[in-house]
Amino acid sequence: MSEKKTATKSTSKRASSAKKSGTNGSSAERKTSSTATSPSSVRRPDNDTLLEWYTMMHLGRLLDDKAANYLKQAKGWSYHAPCSGHEGIQLALGKSFRGGQDYLFPYYRDLMTSLAAGISPYEIILNGLSKDADVAGGGRHMSNHFAKPEIHIQNGSSCTGNQAPQAAGLAKAVQYYKTDAVVFCSSGESATAEGYYYEAVNGATTGKYPVIFVIQNNHYGISVPIEEVNANPRVSDNFRGFSNLKIINCDGTDVVDSWNAMQEAIEFVKSGEGCAMVHAQCVRIGSHSNSDRHELYRSEEELESVRKQDPVAKLRALLIEEKIATDEELTVIEKQNRKEMLAAADQAEAMPDPAPESYADFLIPDPYNATEKRSDEGETVTILQAINTTLKEEFRSNPDTFMWGQDMATKEKGGIFNVSKGMQQEFGWERVHNSPIAEDYIVGSANGFSRYGDNIRVVIEGAEFADYFWPAMEQTVEMGHEYWRTKGQFSPNVTIRLASGGFITGGLYHSQTIEATLQTLPGMRIVYPSFADDAAGLLRTCMRSRGMAVFLEPKFLYNHPWGKTSVPENFEVPFGSARYRREGSDLTIITYGNATHYALKAAERLAEEKGINAAVLDMRSIKPLDEEAICEAAKRTGRILVAHEDHLLGGVGGEIASIITEECFRWLDAPVMRVGSKNTPIGFSPVLEKAILISADDIFEKASQLSAY
């Protein structure tokens, strides 16, 4: 693999007509099982390349020091994690990355990596000062989180290591589309303790995806010494049991050793035999970040030892010792670097901050422009059949549609409920397949896969039951940030399917509905149908839209005759559009999901026993809510009862009631009332479940109370 061109023209000039070395470490023995080696047959780049590398490393050090000065002057860069001591591996990583061809997931300490990979000093400082022109996302994320989506340097979060499943997912797409690209995932050693990091390595090695995990080990997690939290100080040893993984250990303070390690890893990944892990032993010269004081837990003797391993000083000494450059010549380069850095700083400081009102921009992409055309045409089907048919139709329509999840594509079985039955047989394993029981990985890998192209649509079964989705919440929150955090540069076009709700005597982990929690998270849409036609129409709109959507499937109604309807061909339902399932003039029951059918039963009883004509308004869409329909119902009937299956405390009903109180108070003839399931866990015994979950009787009694107010 040829070395990527230098990041800036001026740097290239100062390094004298530096020739690109293109040297690789010789290939090591190839094994399908995990191996751990040091780079073999070290071949040093030519002198001009070494001089160019020093020029860039010194420039990176100046920028790192400048960040600390901005903090002292209270000008910005309010979060700064210095890269000093990591420059050897970071330079090698950045130079191994081919901008616009490969994909790079840096972490918050990767200033040198980002500079070497193609982010200019000016762009580095824009990020540090959180300017509107920051190419990572216009100051929407913490400083020192460098990105440049234009050349495939990904915008990462602050959650340590959470980019790992995303990198694995993106490498999965690279493999599927058979392109000459490598995905690089960089992190510190402490991040590898996260569960989703192991999930990512497991997924990547199982699929032999072209991803290289780079671990920069400086032996401290903020103030925690590695030996206190890890049995293996060389954390790559934790991964020795993984098959299809090439582990390469190197000295991260030595740029040549690091370069050879990266080339060996690239060669192995390109062989198709698996993924690679480069473990670089680094030193942390400064504190973890500006909020840390390392002198409180590190001795002066240790700090002096660390300073002697400074990668920049080591390379400078090598250049002089081997007569590649004199001290005077290097001093000239260093002065020119400082001049360039100061010019970039002046330019960046003059740029405007983000406009306050811009916070509302890029929350979520505009949805597919769905049009609801109702008719009685079409076959009468169950909700399960409607979902299955719609999935197949959309997969046929868009060949760049994919689906994976737990236990959902095994021979003739299509998941525990057979919702995806026949999908793998028609569309093949590569487009429809099982995933490990690792919810964070399922969601994170979908995030990563969708980064390959905006035409891609990923549907995931986020968990077999909504109750088991909680481990995926970190990646779900992350995905909700993406479009906003990147200032519209990346949209995760992912639909998360979840079998939701109770009434199946499932107990604590098979009967919950979780929309109340999800609705608080920005950057996503949430829909919850209760009839087959709406299930088909909403799923189609989710899959055709850009952005993230959660599609909650009422599993109790999968095959229940209550949910059966005719489904018109190519039926669509817009987001945020409620639908009356029963007209009425005395009061309105606002509901969704399983509760819709109990509301309809209650409305029938109200009419028969009390002569009360109750309308039933099915929200269908939880986020966004159809506020216009909600207010229209309040104005028309003057009495509103919100009924939902979720716990009453903190449920969606509170949000609906708040909207009505704020917007329609003068039209009300009674307080907005709510009814839901009890604020307890859901019992397994049918007796307990019946006592806890919402019922038609509950709705009838509350509606009677409302009518009599």
Image (tube, rainbow, N blue to C red):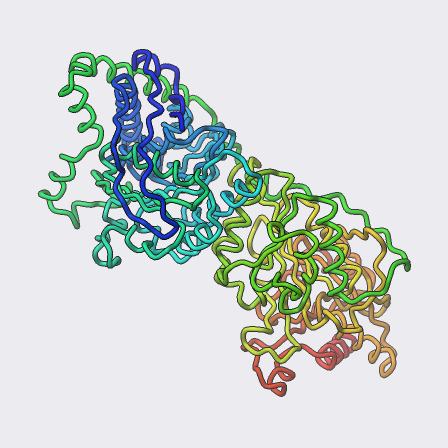
Residue closest to the far bottom: 687
659 displayed left or right of 371: left
Q: Which of 45 and 621 is in front in this view?
A: 45
The quadrant in which the N terminus is found is top left
Which residue appears at 37% of the width and 40% of the height? Answer: 108
Q: Nearer the viewer, residue 90 or 580?
A: 90
Labels in figure, total: 0
**Image spot of residue 486 (x, y percent):** 52, 38
Residue 120 position by quadrant: top left
| Residue 160 is at least partly visible in this image | no
| Residue 390 is at least partly visible in this image | yes
Q: Nearer the viewer, residue 94 or 171?
A: 171
Residue closest to the far left: 301
Residue 497 position by quadrant: bottom right
The quadrant in which the C terminus is found is bottom right
Using the image, determine if residue 89 lies above or below residue 576. above
Which residue appears at 73% of the width and 51% of the height? Answer: 540
Using the image, determine if residue 371 lies above or below residue 332. below
**Image spot of residue 374 (x, y percent):** 87, 55
Which residue appears at 39% of the width and 22% of the height? Answer: 7
Residue 317 position by quadrant: top left
**Image spot of residue 578 (x, y percent):** 76, 57
Using the image, determine if residue 471 lies above or below residue 300. below
Using the image, determine if residue 138 lies above or below residue 686. above
408 displayed left or right of 126: right
**Image spot of residue 466 (x, y percent):** 58, 66
